[in-house]
């Protein structure tokens, strides 16, 4: 569905995307993770054929993104980060007029719009203005809109950012259904649980490059240990514990408020800690998550 | 015309469905008030004056108002709405994600602006007929003149609105372009009444050429310049304006 080779996007002197290779096969849910400014949205805009690549090859649905933009866009569904709905129009009008951009006949457009409003559970609001919708409702409407042309590939830029848990779970459930229908999904997210839930495969982007790639499981296995032990001590300064805990696990990371032990066997690391005569105020043993991978690969410093 | 242009146009038409009643005043009632107020009241002083070709004043200004209505409505539609479409609203962003090309997005919006002006002119033309102001068999051509006036300004207005850095630039367009162009393009008085050093300004004004063509049609007289020359100036504005509009949009959408 998507094949990118040496994809580069520059804005003046700034290189937003710095030579990435991606392959997304049909039916896969593919995720882009990365801190703000990593180049995720820029990559999405290139795949969406809105922003032409500066260099490299980008083929989507077997077509060349540089020359066949309109034909590719006709078969894409796009859920942009900012919903881009027409807030002055009602829900039905938003879907129908968007369908018209694709040259879909009014009759078909109205039928599909009704079905899609049903799919995202907004049928009872069909005649309301978008202005009156909550953030979660707008997101669902944008997802419905992205499906109006029955796309082969749906691109979602941070589909659940800013939504409450109920709305997030509803969106996930709907996306999962799409996936089961064989629709290829490409999404960006800041939520590691979202990535684990939805994505068959992920890339972690940092500074315009791909820092890691694989299934969620592979990424955890490759980049962090199976388990993580979080220790808190009754102290203002945890840095003193770096030395005391040295060698207690495969890797020890000291944070201002706690110490993380990366280990394949949490229990034996905890007894090792106690064996060294240390008594932490709290001990949390947990499985390593994508979040650990993400922070390992992209660092803990705030980007903006 | 490409199908995508019509699809983009439909968006603006759908939007208009919400606001059309608000446009009745400027597009329809206002010109009627001009006819009644100016034409009939001021007419008492100047009717039949040789400066206006010996006709009634109302018959003199009505074709001018016809062309300037098309001009004002079309250019008005393409100031704030164009500025907003890429800034406050997200209509263009949504269109960009669809198969529509930038050219189709542009032409759809221009077509809407053009048709708003032309439909207002059509209304006004009917009012003129009711008032008995169509004195020549050529009168229907005045509608073409009004349409040409609108067509000559849409591109330029779009380009200015799209490239405006700040909203205040749009108020300037209204105050320092649309209003003076209406006042000094021989709508209310013949160009000869202006000092000779100001007249060349009207010669480059698309509105003046449109007004003269419109007046020539409804009064059945020859326009001051050869018809081809009037049309030529309008065409230069239309084509130049379209290229400027396209340039401004591509620059704005540059990603």
Image (spheres, coloured by chain):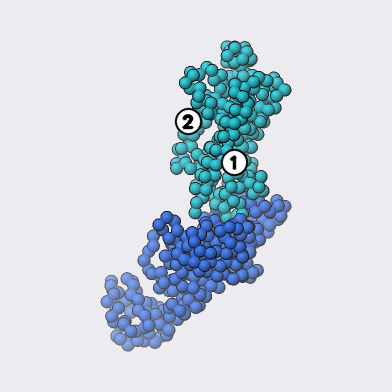
Chain A takes which shade in the image? blue
The crowding category of the residue bearing disc 2, from other C-alpha atoms within 10 Å (few below 14, some 14 to 19, many at least 20), is few
Residue placed most toward the observer, A204 or B197: B197
Residue sitting at x 60%, y 28%:
B229
Q: Which mark is residue B90?
A: none
Residue marked by disc 2: B176
Q: Is mark 1 on a helix, strand or loop?
A: helix
Residue placed most toward the observer, B228 or A298: B228
Q: Can residue A96 be seen in this view?
A: no
Along the horizontal axis of the image, is A285 left or right of B44?
left
Q: Mark 1 lies on which chain?
A: B
Rendered cyan, the chain in question is B
The quarter of the displayed image where residue B75 is located: top right
Give above or below for A134 relative to A198.
above
Q: Position of residue B73 (x, y in %)?
A: 58, 33
Q: Which chain carries label 2?
A: B
Q: State whether discs 2 and 1 lie on one chain.
A: yes
Give above or below for A302 relative to A87.
below
Residue placed most toward the observer, A201 or B209: B209
Give above or below for B236 relative to A276.
above
Give the total of numbered labels: 2
Residue marked by disc 1: B110
Q: Where is residue A104 in the image (x, y as percent from the top left)?
A: 68, 53
Say which quadrant the N terminus of chain A sits in: bottom right
Residue sitting at x 71%, y 55%:
A108
Residue sitting at x 64%, y 69%:
A182
Say which quadrant the C terminus of chain A sits in: bottom left
Mark 2 or mark 1: which comes first in sequence? 1
The crowding category of the residue bearing disc 1, from other C-alpha atoms within 10 Å (few below 14, some 14 to 19, many at least 20), is many
Give above or below for A88 relative to A282.
above
Residue placed most toward the observer, A108 or A40: A40
């Amino acid at each position: 569905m998507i094949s990118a080779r040496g994809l580069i996007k520059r804005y003046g002197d700034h290189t937003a995307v710095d030579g990435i290779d991606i392959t997304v096969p049909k039916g896969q849910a593919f995720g882009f993770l990365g801190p703000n400014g990593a180049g995720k949205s820029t990559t999405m805009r290139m795949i969406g054929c809105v922003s032409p690549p500066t260099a490299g090859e980008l083929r989507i649905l077997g077509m060349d993104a540089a020359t066949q933009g309109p034909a590719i866009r006709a078969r894409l569904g796009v859920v942009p980060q900012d919903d881009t709905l027409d807030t002055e129009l009602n829900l039905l009008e938003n879907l129908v007029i968007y369908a018209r951009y694709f040259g879909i006949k009014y009759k078909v457009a109205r039928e599909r719009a009704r079905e899609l409003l049903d799919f995202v559970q907004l049928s009872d609001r069909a005649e309301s203005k978008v202005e009156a919708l909550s953030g979660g409702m707008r997101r669902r409407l944008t997802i419905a809109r992205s499906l109006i042309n029955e796309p082969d590939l749906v691109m979602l830029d941070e589909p659940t950012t800013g939504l409450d848990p109920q709305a997030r779970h509803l969106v996930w459930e709907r996306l999962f259904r799409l996936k089961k229908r064989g629709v290829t999904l490409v999404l960006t997210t800041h939520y590691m649980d979202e990535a684990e839930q939805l994505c068959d495969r992920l890339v972690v982007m940092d500074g315009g490059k791909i820092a890691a790639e694989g299934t969620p499981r592979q990424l955890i296995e490759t980049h962090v240990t199976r388990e993580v032990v979080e220790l808190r001590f009754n102290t203002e300064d945890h840095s003193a514990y770096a030395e005391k805990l040295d060698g207690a696990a495969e890797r020890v990371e000291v944070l201002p408020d706690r110490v993380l032990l990366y280990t394949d066997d949490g229990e034996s690391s905890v007894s090792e800690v106690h064996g060294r005569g240390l008594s932490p105020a709290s001990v949390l043993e947990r499985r390593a998550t994508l979040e650990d991978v993400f922070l390992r690969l992209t660092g803990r410093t705030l980007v903006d | 015309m490409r199908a995508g242009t019509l699809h983009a146009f439909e968006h603006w038409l759908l939007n208009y469905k919400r606001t059309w009643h608000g446009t009745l005043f400027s597009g329809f009632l206002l010109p009627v008030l001009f006819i009644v107020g100016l034409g009939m009241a001021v007419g008492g002083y100047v009717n039949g004056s040789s400066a206006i070709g010996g006709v009634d004043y109302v018959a003199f200004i009505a074709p001018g108002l016809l062309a300037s209505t098309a001009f004002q409505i079309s250019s008005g539609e393409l100031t704030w709405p164009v500025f907003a479409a890429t800034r406050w609203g997200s209509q263009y962003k949504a269109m960009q994600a669809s198969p529509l090309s930038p050219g189709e997005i542009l032409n759809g919006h221009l077509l809407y602006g053009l048709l708003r002006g032309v439909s207002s002119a059509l209304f006004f033309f009917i009012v003129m007929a009711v008032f008995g102001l169509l004195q020549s068999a050529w009168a229907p051509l005045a509608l073409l003149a009004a349409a040409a006036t609108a067509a000559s300004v849409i591109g330029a207005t779009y380009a200015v609105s799209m490239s405006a850095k700040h909203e205040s630039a749009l108020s300037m367009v209204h105050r320092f372009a649309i209003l003076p162009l209406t006042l000094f393009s021989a709508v209310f008085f013949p160009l000869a009444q202006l000092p000779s050093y100001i007249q060349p300004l009207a010669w480059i004004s698309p509105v003046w050429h449109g007004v003269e063509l419109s007046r020539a049609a409804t009064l059945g007289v020859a326009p001051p310049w050869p018809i081809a020359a009037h049309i030529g100036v309008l065409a230069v504005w239309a084509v130049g304006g379209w290229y400027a509009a396209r340039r401004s949009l591509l620059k704005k959408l540059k990603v």
